[in-house]
Amino acid sequence: MIENVKIEFLQNIQLFSSLTDIELQQIAGKIRIEEFRKNEIVLREEDTNEYMYIILDGQVKVTQATEDGKEILLAIHKTHEFFGEVSLIDGKTSPATVQASEDSFIAFIAKKDFYALLISQSKVLEKLLQILCSRLRDSWRRIYLLNFKHASDRVKTLFLSLSFENGSKTPEGIVLNLKLTHQEIADMTGLTRESVTRVLDKLQKEGAITVLKNRRICLSHKFVKNV
């Protein structure tokens, strides 16, 4: 019964989407699942990473502390996404902390099983390369947005960047499938929370965005057209 539950979760992971049920069963037998409460640390900065982590349900944030103690938000991973694979590939630890931003169930795949999977399943290797390329392009977009002097340009460019991987098209526009606080947006754009609040208020008044009841943000057709 537990194995069936694992397979049901794994079928929704992009990395494993091309595998058969039999192939998924082989992976399911090699993973373990842990529950993390909101704000609980999943992976500490400079910890040796011996596992790849798959978010079966929930959301985590990846942060890094600067020398002056400021926290920089590097990434947000949500349900069906994974992290930790880079450290398994190059053998180096990542100077970042991973924290659950809501109650989450996370699966762990050990290094030896990760490598065995890549060697035996070319379809998984191909998917992994595609995902890593997508993340690299996203990093380029994040660097690009930091070149903007105006706060509104940074926020709008961030939302557009997030829409590529985390956006769902609706009749009203594109909904970002992430629950973002004003502070998280500030951390991702290098702005203060107060500046982000002013920008969001202005965008809402202009009809460029709508903040939904579930804290998700809808980018209007006008917003997407003008950015």
Image (cartoon, helix red, strand yellow):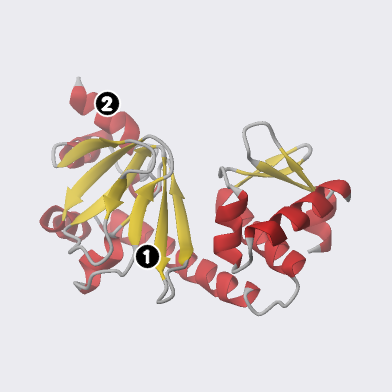
User: Which residue shows up at 19% across the image and 42% down it?
Assistant: 27
Looking at the rendered structure, the kind of residue marked 1 is Leu
Vertical placement of 211 versus 2: above or below?
Answer: below
Give the residue number, with chain letter if any, for mark 2.
5
Left or right: 133 in relation to 99: right
Give the residue number, with chain letter if any, for mark 1.
129
Quarter of the rendering containing residue 160: bottom right
Q: Check the image and name the residue furthest to the right.
A: 206
Cα distance in 3D space between marks 1 and 2: 27 Å
The C terminus lies in quadrant: bottom right
Mark 1: give few (<14), some (14-19) or many (20+) Cα within 10 Å.
few
User: Which residue shows up at 14% across the image and 42% down it?
Assistant: 30
Q: Which mark is residue 22?
A: none
For discs 1 and 2, the disc positioned in front in the rendered view: 2
Q: Check the image and name the residue furthest to the top.
A: 1
The N terminus lies in quadrant: top left
Left or right: 58 in relation to 118: right
Looking at the rendered structure, the kind of residue marked 2 is Val
Residue 36 drawn at (x, y percent): 30, 38
